[in-house]
Amino acid sequence: MQQIYILDDTIVGISTTVGRGAISIVRLSGPQSIELVSKIFKGKDLTKAKTHTIHYGYIYNYETKETIDEVLVSIFKKPKTYTKEDLVEINCHGGQLVTQMVVEQLVMLGARIAQAGEFTRRAFLNGRIDLAKAEAVMDIIDAENKNALKMANQGITGELSAKIKEERQKLLNVIMQIAVNIDYPEYDDVVELTKKEIYPILDEVLNDIDALLQTSKDAVKIKNGINTALVGKPNVGKSSLLNALLQDNRAIVTEIPGTTRDVIEAKLNLGGFALNLIDTAGIRETEDVIEKIGVIKSKEKIEEADLILMIFDGSREIEAEDLEILNSVRDKKHICIVNKSDLEQKIDLSKIPNAIIISTKDSNSIKVLSDEISKQIFEQDINLNTNIYISNARQISKLVAAKDSLNKAIEDIRSEQFIDFIELSIKEAWISLGEILGEVKDTELLDELFSRFCLGK
């Protein structure tokens, strides 16, 4: 059911994690924010306080006058606030009960409990931020590694927004000139915008969009992690390696081949990036129905993986099954690992090019492997030298739509279609780019997007 949002009321929400902690922040936004808090605040008269100031005092029960908590109250007056409305933040002690009691007092006095993401939604609707920046706020909250955080902060600074606005302006200039030529063809001083003049501009915008889409591949890896599958025959040490990389007993390890019968997944931060480690079932011919399902899943994960850690048992001679698995991953990014270096070595290393020899019991060899993973994937495959990343699926889809429209416009130019048809495709591209920033406001889209935020954000 669609929520109805009113911008002239005052909302209240808890902006910190609900539970026991050192502090808890109750936030209000709206025209009555300062007035409502002043009614239950003992200390300085908040209605006379200057903007961007902090005040010490006590919050009390409006009816009984009993003290609820000792607090610090921050006052922010419009328009220089997060929401561009009057905004108040009450720093309470971090008990769940005391925080809830403060909220209840404010609701009793007339504030409304904020919907999920409503503070950021108000910032967007009041023109404080565009939709791309709003999504960057959510990316900061969700960031699980330092490079994902860096990427999200670049979104907050508005570099993506500025780039999209630049591309839209190029298209708008073309649209306006076409409109002038169509409406006033008799004006001699109006430069005739020929198809040859339109094409280079569209081609330039198209190349810029392609560049953004190319970096989006890196951005998705940075944000969501690199899918890394641990692959090999049963009992070569895949689960042991998973545990060693995580420095935790995440997977069950036994001497019995086929112990891992299903895919086990875990996340590892390595060198500022996230690895989605996938411990697959050992690949072999088997009559066990359950193990067969695990083998099928393992082969599916190989196809989906960005990186394969191909593991061999150094204490055994290499077998046909080993080579068959190796052959199946040759066309993908992979690292060959010979495990169990602490045992007598029987494997023929000449059949495994550039193998890294490790023991999952030796932390030094695990570090060598970790460094190699960083070198192979992060330094070679991910570009960190750009200031603009797009990792959001919605934004990427709008870029693709804009690209398709521009390709259609260029195709129409080449086939000498009427300028009116060309203009329609250019307008579609301009609209798609605008949707990245929220220039075209779809209420259902906004409901879905901001519902993913926490209540106090």
Image: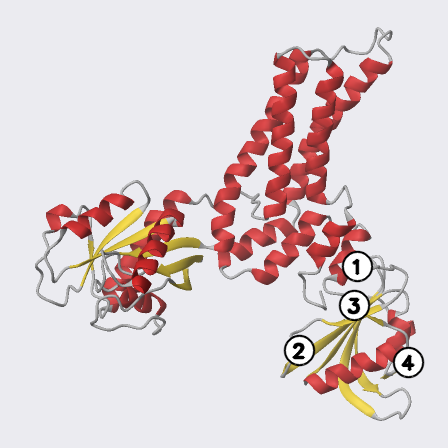
Q: CA distance from mark 2 to mark 4?
A: 24 Å
Marks 1 and 2, how far apart at CA: 22 Å
Describe the colour scheme in one phrase. secondary structure
Mark 1 sits on what residue? 83
Residue 18 is labelled as: 2
Crowd rating for badge 4 (residues with CA inside 10 Å; few <14, some 14–19, many 20+): some
Q: Which mark is residue 311?
A: none
* Disc 4 residue type (three-letter): Lys
Residue 239, compared with residue 121, is above or below; it is: below
Mark 3 Cα within 10 Å, few/some/many (few <14, many 20+)? many
Indicate the position of residue 171 as horizontal and vertical percent values.
71, 27
Work out whether residue 244 can be spotted.
Answer: yes
Task: Indicate left or right for 284 with 444 as reference.
Answer: left
Up/down of 397 relative to 368, above or below: above
In the rendered structure, which disc, 1 or 3, sits on the residue that comes first in sequence? Answer: 1
Mark 1 to mark 4: distance in Å? 22 Å
Would residue 160 appear left or right of 46 to someone viewing this image? Answer: left
Which quadrant holds residue 338?
Answer: bottom left
Q: Which residue is mark 4?
A: 39
Look at label 1 and name its amino acid: Thr
- Amino acid type of the residue that numbered disc 3 sits on in the rendered structure: Ala
Q: Position of residue 63 (x, y in %)?
A: 91, 89
The residue that disc 3 covers is: 114
- The CA span between labels 1 and 3 is 13 Å
Residue 356 image offset from top left, x and y in percent: 21, 54
